[in-house]
Image (tube, rainbow, N blue to C red):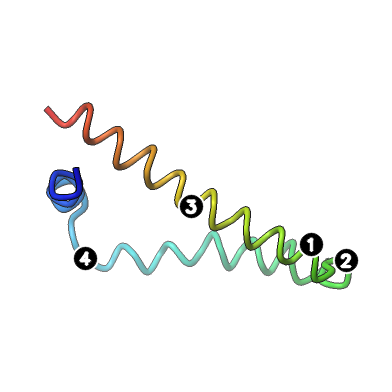
Amino acid sequence: MKNRYCECYRRHHAVGNGHKWLIFPVASAISTELLPNRRAVTPKVGLTMAASTVINAVGEELLWRGAYLDVFSR
């Protein structure tokens, strides 16, 4: 599945300068929500936030790119 996934990914995602705009939502969330409320973030909350972010990112990549492209790439 890896080779097919890589092939589908390359075919559906053109390489260009569009990736630089991906920082905008992250910067917006950090500046509007995280920084003003940073005193409420304890180490336990911070660790939970980081772990759920990693799990969500990996899950979305596998589900919405890998599985979807593998099934519907025809």
- Which residue does the image show at 16% across and 31% down from the upper left? 73
Residue named by callout 1:
45
68 above or below 44?
above
Residue 33 is situated, as x and y percent measured from the top left of the image, at: 74, 61
**Nearest to N terminus: mark 3 or mark 4:** 4
From mark 2 to mark 4, how far is it between C-alphas?
39 Å
For the N terminus, the image quarter is top left
| 28 left or right, relative to 12 | right
* Percent of width and height locating residue 3: 13, 49
Please report contact status of discs 2 and 1: CB closer than 8 Å, yes or no: yes
- Earlier sequence position, callout 3 versus callout 1: 1
Secondary structure under tag 2 reads helix
Spatial CA distance of label 3 from label 4 is: 22 Å
Judge from the rendering whether residue 53 lies leftward or rightward of residue 7; answer left or right.
Answer: right
Give the label, 2 or 3, closer to the camera.
Answer: 3
Asked if residue 38 is positioned above or below residue 50 in the image, the reply reads below
Q: CA distance from mark 2 to mark 1?
A: 9 Å
Quarter that holds the C terminus: top left
Instruction: Residue 56: give its label.
Output: none
Q: Which residue is mark 2?
A: 40
- In the rendered structure, which amino acid carries the disc numbered 4? Gly
Residue at image coords 21%, 52%: 13
Q: Nearer the N terminus, badge 2 or badge 3?
A: 2
Instruction: Give whichever of discs 2 and 4 has the lower sequence position.
Output: 4
First in sequence, mark 2 or 1: give its number.
2
Res 16 label = 4
Q: Disc 3 designates what residue?
A: 57
Identify the secondary structure beneath mark 3.
Answer: helix
